[in-house]
Image: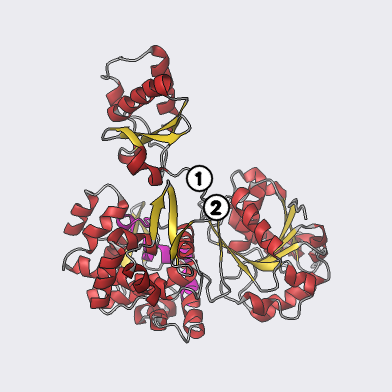
Amino acid sequence: MARKIRKVAVLGAGVMGAQIACHFANIGIEVLLLDMPAKEINEKEQKAGLLPEHPKVRNRIVNDLFLKATRLKPAPLYLQTYSNRITTGNFEDDLHKIAECDWVIEAIIENLKIKQELYTKIEKHRKPGSLITTNTSGIPIQMLIQGRSEDFAAHFCGTHFFNPPRYLKLLEIIPSPNTNQEVIDFLTDFGERFLGKSVVSCKDTPAFIANRVGVYSMMSVFHLIDEFGFTVDEIDKLTGPIIGRPKSATFRTCDVVGLDTLVFVAQNLQKALQDDEAKDVFQIPEFIQHMMGNQWLGSKTGQGFYKKIKSEGKSEILSLNLESFEYQEKQRVKFGEFEAAKAVPHLNDRFKVLLKGNSKVNQFYQKMFFGLFAYVSNRMPEITDDLYKIDEAICSGFAWEMGPFEIWESLGAKKTLSMMEEMGFKAANWVHNMVQEDLGFYQLKDGLKQYYDVNTNAHQTIPGTENLVLLNNLRSSKTIWSNEGASIIDLGDGIINLEFHTKMNTIGSEIIQGTNKAIELAESDYKALIISNEGENFSAGAILDWYLCWPLNRSLKSWTWLFALSKIQC
């Protein structure tokens, strides 16, 4: 069927529901946002002379939640005026309006009974053939459709957005055996083309893919603290940008997400994963239990692993001492191993430096990564048949630059497997079979990235990448000119690409030299020139003081264009 999404209903205006509504409004879709009705008037409403049945009273909960969401930072709306695309209401007075919607997204409390009760009401109003999905992160999809009609079940699946949905790219789609393939195909295409998501299809297993692996990774770090004695500041230094992860690293991420949320997922996993060889990792450590008891849950309660205070008119961030449970000034952390790692420009080469050696830092990384590698290998085919989906999910959902199998491959699959086994980390049998054939998790062929398929014991091209031009896949064999700050790559079909790779892609002498060369080549031997790179940002801007002394050795037309380019990036 030719399906179009003109209006979406989001049921539940909590942290996720309201932000999902905002993201749909961002792409121009009309949204109906509903939540529980208020039953009693408050003091402000009483003074205004409002009665309990007045819409302002009935919709107070949803309106307050929506207003709170619009004030979040980073902002969930591209423009505040887009809030006009969202209409609010409540489950008792306005649920019938979902009959006008093409897609209904449920985002209420993680409680099976409450969700099923809401689904019973939804069935009375939704139009046949309309999409109905849930943002659950922990309840099996098959359990949610029990007792539902055939049409409901056929158009129902999980659509798990990650917080904040405007910024984190991952959208996990979790079908049940009853879900129509057309629904899965449509949601995958819509998520990628219109919502700007990296869409990963998951099996209906506890916590799906990203949270299963991501929460394991965080919990394993918690358990390594007792062994190595690192502080909060040290752990965030070790698990941040140096290994391609966000600046929020481990503990700051916990504060942002909410410690209670992390504990909820971990406890549910420990209960549900009776056959998981690493289920003890999801056991809550004593220092986390202590913080939960004190309600030190992170940003939502004003303190967690970090606490922001004001002293003499200035803000200061303190970190938690995990032994005394007192807050102290943040430490300036310096590790000698970092200096050698920072000298390595490419992340995929940096891991060899960080894991090589017997220092305390080296051993921490070895145990952290070897445990993670063993864990993800043993999750196949439980959570997915395709290893690239684990990497894609964890990178898009947790903002890692490289996924577990990509990191393992960068260290050498066979060599690392041997080191893991010596330290007692047991990988899955399929990994042993793979390395015995002298194969790796990934390989490049004809400019395409291929992954090892455990079902065929051979490499397959990652679906959906056949028509993509990825510079990382071409650079080693197609570079026709380069200097320290720029490269020119032959893309084929008479097209060349100028790529920046200075620090933060700042525009200086190397890039100007590369630009001049690229223009010269394009004018003489090629049909077109593209300027593109795969850096986090296109360019941090021009080195302006350098411009003042650079000799004018190109035409005025070229220099005008280059200056305009640098100003745009500034």
Percent coordinates x, y for residue 457 in the rendering = 44, 67
Front residue of 438 and 564? 438
Q: Quadrant of the N terminus?
A: bottom right
* Secondary structure mainly formed by the magenta segment: helix
Residue 318 x/y as whole percent? 32, 62
Residue 359: image quadrant is bottom left
Q: Position of residue 123 (x, y in %)?
A: 80, 71
- Regarding residue 338, the answer to whether it shows in the image is yes
The C terminus: image quadrant? top left
- Residue range of the region highlighted in magenta in the rendering: 240-263
Q: Which mark is residue 192?
A: none
Q: Relative to residue 345, is residue 153 drawn left or right?
A: right
- Decide which of 409, 78 is in the foreground and name it: 409
Q: Locate residue 96 relative to residue 87 in the image: left or right.
A: right
Q: Is residue 152 magenta?
A: no
Residue at (27% x, 47% y) in the render: 345
Q: Are marks 1 and 2 in contact (CB under 8 Å)?
A: yes
Q: Secondary structure at mark 1?
A: loop
Q: Secondary structure at mark 2?
A: loop
**Residue 246 lies in the magenta stretch:** yes
What amino acid is found at the position of numbered circle 1 in the picture? Leu
Amino acid on which the number 2 mark rests in the picture? Gly
> Relative to residue 263, is residue 318 drawn left or right?
left
The label shown at residue 468 is 1
* Residue at image mark 2: 464
